[in-house]
């Protein structure tokens, strides 16, 4: 069968197969330390929230976004918001209910970093969480009833 009698897509398919074979051969010729380890994107799962250190969780989450090719801020925001545990949602209600139009993920991650600081779940934070149900609302002494 000559080139004139081949189906229209046969030439393109043959060229693509030839290109794929050449790329595979070139990759196999590289030393192991130069090969990039990649997982299939469909099998990458976001990290579970890390209670002991939410700041480290954000680092893991950024690595997940890079591996899964999640580039836009709104998608990152939505994924991060769904991974937050229920008991922390109220701490970020204002951001979650009204996501900022500009950089929503960056603002949420900055709020998480600010809330937990460098030492996540620090003794101060744990103490505040324990005392929160028992704290009285602040009242002006002149308006309080005695």
Image: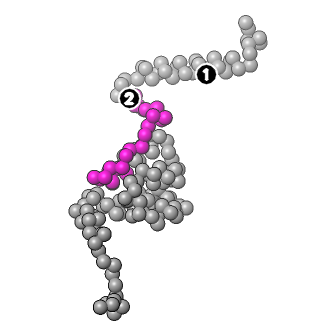
C-alpha gap between disc 2 and disc 1: 25 Å
Point out residue 117 in the picture as x, y percentages from the top left corner. Answer: 30, 61
Which residue is pictured at 39% across the width and 64% down the height?
Answer: 91
Q: Which mark is residue 69?
A: none
| 59 versus 88 height, above or below | above
Q: Which residues are magenta?
A: 34-58
Of residues 113 and 137, the one nearer the viewer is 137
Residue 54 shown in magenta: yes
The colour scheme applied to this rendered structure is: one colour
Q: Residue pushed farthest bottom? A: 142
Q: Which residue is mark 1?
A: 16
Q: Residues within 10 Å of mark 2 (few under 14, many from 20)?
A: few
Q: Residue pushed farthest right? A: 4
Q: Residue pushed farthest top? A: 1
Point out residue 102 in the picture as x, y percentages from the top left corner. Answer: 53, 61
**For residue 90, which quarter of the picture?**
bottom left
Q: Which residue is mark 2?
A: 34
Which residue is pictured at 77% across the width and 12% down the height?
Answer: 4
**Residue 124 visible in the displayed image:** no
| 143 versus 37 height, above or below | below
């Amino acid at each position: 069968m000559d080139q004139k009698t081949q189906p229209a897509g046969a030439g393109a398919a043959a060229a693509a197969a030839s290109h794929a074979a050449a790329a595979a051969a070139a990759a196999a010729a590289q030393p192991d330390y130069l090969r990039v380890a990649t997982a299939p994107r469909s099998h990458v799962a976001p990290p579970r929230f890390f209670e002991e250190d939410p700041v480290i969780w954000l680092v893991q989450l950024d690595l997940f976004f890079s591996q899964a090719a999640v580039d836009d801020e709104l998608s990152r925001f939505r994924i991060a918001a769904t991974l937050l545990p229920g008991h922390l949602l109220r701490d970020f209600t204002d951001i979650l209910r009204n996501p900022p139009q500009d950089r929503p993920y960056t603002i949420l991650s900055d709020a998480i970093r600010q809330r937990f600081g460098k030492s996540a779940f620090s003794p101060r934070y744990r103490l505040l969480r324990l005392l929160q149900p028992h704290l009285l609302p602040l009242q002006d002494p002149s308006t309080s009833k005695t």
